[in-house]
Structure formats: C-alpha cells, structure tokens
Image: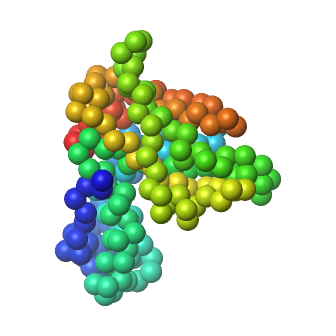
C-alpha cells in the first residue's frame, strides 16, 4: 500500500526548480548515500521515500520540459506507487550490468529475481523473515519467462513488532535466487534513515 502520494503542488515549476535544484540535488545524493546498498557483485538497491521520488519527478519534468499539469500528473501516477506507506520499505533494485556480454548472461539467468529478495530482522531463533512483495502489474511489464529487466521495484511490509525490531538490528537484505545468492547487512546509518520514514 503506497504512502501518501505527491500532488501537483508539491512539484516546483521549471523556473523555481532551477533555483533550488543544486541544493536539492546535494540533499538527495546525501540521502541516497545512506539508502543505497550493494548485494553481491551486480545487485544494488535504493530505498525510496517521498524525497527521492520527488527528485525523480522533478528531474523527469526538467529533462522533458514538462509544462502542463497533465504532464506532471502522468509522472506522479508512475512514481507515487514507489512512496512507502507506514511500516513499509520500497526499493528500486538495479542489476548493474555494464556490457552486452553481462546482459546476455545475467538477464536470462535472473528471471524471478524480484520475488527472491527477503529481509531478515533480528538474530538467532528470534529472526523474522519478511519476503518482498511485487506489484503484479509491474511484474507483468518487466519479466518474461526467458528474460528479466535490469530494474525492478519491490516492497516489504513490516508488522509493528518488526518495525520496532528493525531500528536496533541486525537487519540483513538477501537475494535468494538459484543463480544469485548474496546478502548485505544494513548498517546503522541505513536503518536510521529508513526508520525516520516511519
């Protein structure tokens, strides 16, 4: 369930955005530094929130010279679902494939990767395992039986008890795909940034 969406009035017009862009860009780069996590050699995730999504919409509007409310609303309709709701984490998952050879090797091998992410919260016998949730419409657009896309969007829905446990850690984000099994522990700075969204 997405969080409270951005509205047209949340998006600066092009002239106003040019004035704020440099400082906003620096803010988002710093924010993403805490929210970008590498999992193994080719998977990187970015935990999205209202600020990162607003930046994406502002940059798209700037690049495409969008001037009408209708154009902006179309972008908001695309990106608002990335804003996490209470107790949720929303991730953009990137397969960092930089050569034609890597694309040919990995995209067919990693079909279904978006369904293979899990969050492990806590340690020992008290570990909570939370599976990723994938929007069916998104999955239908990005994955075929024989190949997958290099960008995916997934969500984790945490219970109130899991939210409480999350801040103190440990928290591990894992890819448990037959062709790719790696994990990364979320550092204190990352957990703090994500907890602040709730």
State whether residue 22 is above or below residue 43.
Answer: below
Q: In this view, which residue lies farthest toward the bottom?
A: 68
**In this view of the protein, which residue sits in the foreground, 48 or 113?**
113
Q: In this view, which residue lies farthest toward the right?
A: 101
Residue 84 locus on image (x, y percent): 31, 51
Residue 119 locus on image (x, y percent): 43, 32
Instruction: Classify the position of the C terminus by image quarter.
Output: top left
Query: What count of labels does the image hold?
Result: 0
**In this view of the protein, which residue sits in the foreground, 16 or 96?**
96
The residue drawn where x is 47% and y is 58% is 136
Q: In this view, which residue lies farthest toward the left?
A: 9
Residue 151 locus on image (x, y percent): 55, 56
Residue 140 locus on image (x, y percent): 55, 62
Residue 4 located left or right of residue 181? left
Q: Quadrant of residue 70?
A: bottom left
The residue drawn where x is 33% and y is 71% is 76
Residue 102 visible, this angle: no
The residue drawn where x is 40% and y is 12% is 125
Q: Quadrant of residue 103?
A: bottom right
The residue drawn where x is 61% and y is 58% is 143
The structure's colour scheme is rainbow
**In this view of the protein, which residue sits in the foreground, 159 or 96?**
159
State whether residue 187 is above or below residue 152.
Answer: above
Residue 181 visible, this angle: yes
Q: Quadrant of residue 120?
A: top left
Residue 30 located left or right of residue 163? right
């Amino acid at each position: 369930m997405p969080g409270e969406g951005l509205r047209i009035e949340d998006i600066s017009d092009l002239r106003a955005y040019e004035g704020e862009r440099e400082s906003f860009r620096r803010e988002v780069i710093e924010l993403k530094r805490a929210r970008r996590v590498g999992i193994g050699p080719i998977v990187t995730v970015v935990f999205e929130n209202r600020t990162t999504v607003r930046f994406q919409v502002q940059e798209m509007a700037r690049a495409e010279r969008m001037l009408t409310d209708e154009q902006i609303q179309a972008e908001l309709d695309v990106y608002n679902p990335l804003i996490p709701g209470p107790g949720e984490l929303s991730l953009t998952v990137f397969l960092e494939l930089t050569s034609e050879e890597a694309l040919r090797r990995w995209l067919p091998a990693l079909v279904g990767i978006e369904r293979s992410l899990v969050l492990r919260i806590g340690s020992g016998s008290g570990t909570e395992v939370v599976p990723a949730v994938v929007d069916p419409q998104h999955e239908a657009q990005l994955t075929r039986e024989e190949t997958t896309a290099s960008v995916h969007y997934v969500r984790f829905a945490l219970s109130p008890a899991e939210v409480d446990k999350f801040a103190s850690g440990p928290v591990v984000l894992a890819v448990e795909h037959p062709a790719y099994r790696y994990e990364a522990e979320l550092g204190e700075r990352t957990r703090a940034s994500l907890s602040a969204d709730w």
